[in-house]
Image (cartoon, helix red, strand yellow):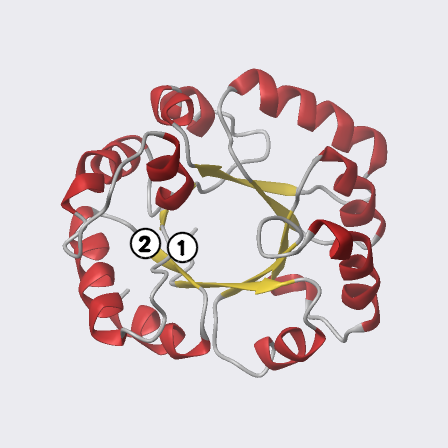
């Protein structure tokens, strides 16, 4: 499995959700986590329900396991799991999903902590629901007070760890969405290392990721 461009869209912003499905992203991730304010998370679910969504190319980034009922009821094909850190976490999630789902829900773990990096092999081995994994450098860097420079050399070893134990993982997002030159450099580096795609946070990043991967 390979996703060249993975567009993350805040779940409470209806206009951005509707626009996302006019774009050429390989996968769209409707977010219930960090881009959605706490007081908007339940409203975000209502907005998502009321939008015309191609569920065959849509995952939900959950905020907590409480969101699983929404995901399964609406029959989304998969979830992005923030702070994936152990096979025990995945086993519990699998058991909960089995009680709720009408169709099998894939999981894309987001590796964004040192514990997740340490347990990469066991997380990636959980083939019950996992076909691909993704890297989230920003929360990882924040948790260890790591300042990432323009050339991203500080996260190089973490990226190497990702591609060492997984095939075509999704690389971390590039937050300065106005800097398309920087995004292109970051994406080329990810490609060279062995990533198969890139998390995107702006429509202008999609074409670059598709071209490079």
Element carrying mark 2: loop
Q: How many labels were placed on the picture? A: 2
Q: Mark 1 points at which residue?
A: 2
Residue positioned 75% across, 57% down in the render = 40
Element carrying mark 1: loop
Residue positioned 43% across, 40% down in the render = 133
Position of 78 with respect to 42 (left or right) is left
Position of 163 with respect to 198 (left or right) is left
Q: Quadrant of the C terminus?
A: bottom left
Taking 67 as reference, is 117 above or below it?
above
Taking 33 as reference, is 96 above or below it?
above
- Please rate how many residues cluster around mark 1, counting C-alpha atoms within 10 Å: few if below 14, some from 14 to 19, many from 20: some
* Mark 1 touches mark 2? (CB < 8 Å): yes
Where residue 131 sits: x, y (%)? 49, 40
The residue furthest top is 88
Q: Is residue 195 in view?
A: yes
Residue positioned 23% across, 46% down in the render = 148
Where residue 7 sits: x, y (%)? 49, 65
Q: Mark 2 points at which residue?
A: 196
Task: Residue 68: give its label.
Answer: none
Where residue 29 sits: x, y (%)? 58, 59
Q: Which of 189 and 46 is in front in this view?
A: 46
Where residue 105 sits: x, y (%)? 68, 42
């Amino acid at each position: 499995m390979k996703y060249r461009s993975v567009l993350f869209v805040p779940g409470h912003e209806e206009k951005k959700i509707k626009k996302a499905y006019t774009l050429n992203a390989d996968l769209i991730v409707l977010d219930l986590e960090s881009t959605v304010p706490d007081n908007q998370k339940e409203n975000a679910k209502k907005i998502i329900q009321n939008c015309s969504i191609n569920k065959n190319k849509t995952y939900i980034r959950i905020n907590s396991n409480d969101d699983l009922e929404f995901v399964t009821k609406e029959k989304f094909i998969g979830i992005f799991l923030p702070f994936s850190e152990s096979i025990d976490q995945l086993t519990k999630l699998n058991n909960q999903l089995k009680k709720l789902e009408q169709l099998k829900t894939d999981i894309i773990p987001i590796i964004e902590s040192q514990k997740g990096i340490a347990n990469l092999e066991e997380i990636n081995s959980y083939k019950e629901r996992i076909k691909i994994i993704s890297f989230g450098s920003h929360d990882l860097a924040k948790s260890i007070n790591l300042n990432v420079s323009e050339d991203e050399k500080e996260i190089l070893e973490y990226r190497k760890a990702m591609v060492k134990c997984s095939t075509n993982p999704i690389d971390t997002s590039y937050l300065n969405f106005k800097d398309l030159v920087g995004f292109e450099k970051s994406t080329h580096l990810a490609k060279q290392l062995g990533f198969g795609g890139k998390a995107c946070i702006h429509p202008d990043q999609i074409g670059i990721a598709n071209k490079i991967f």
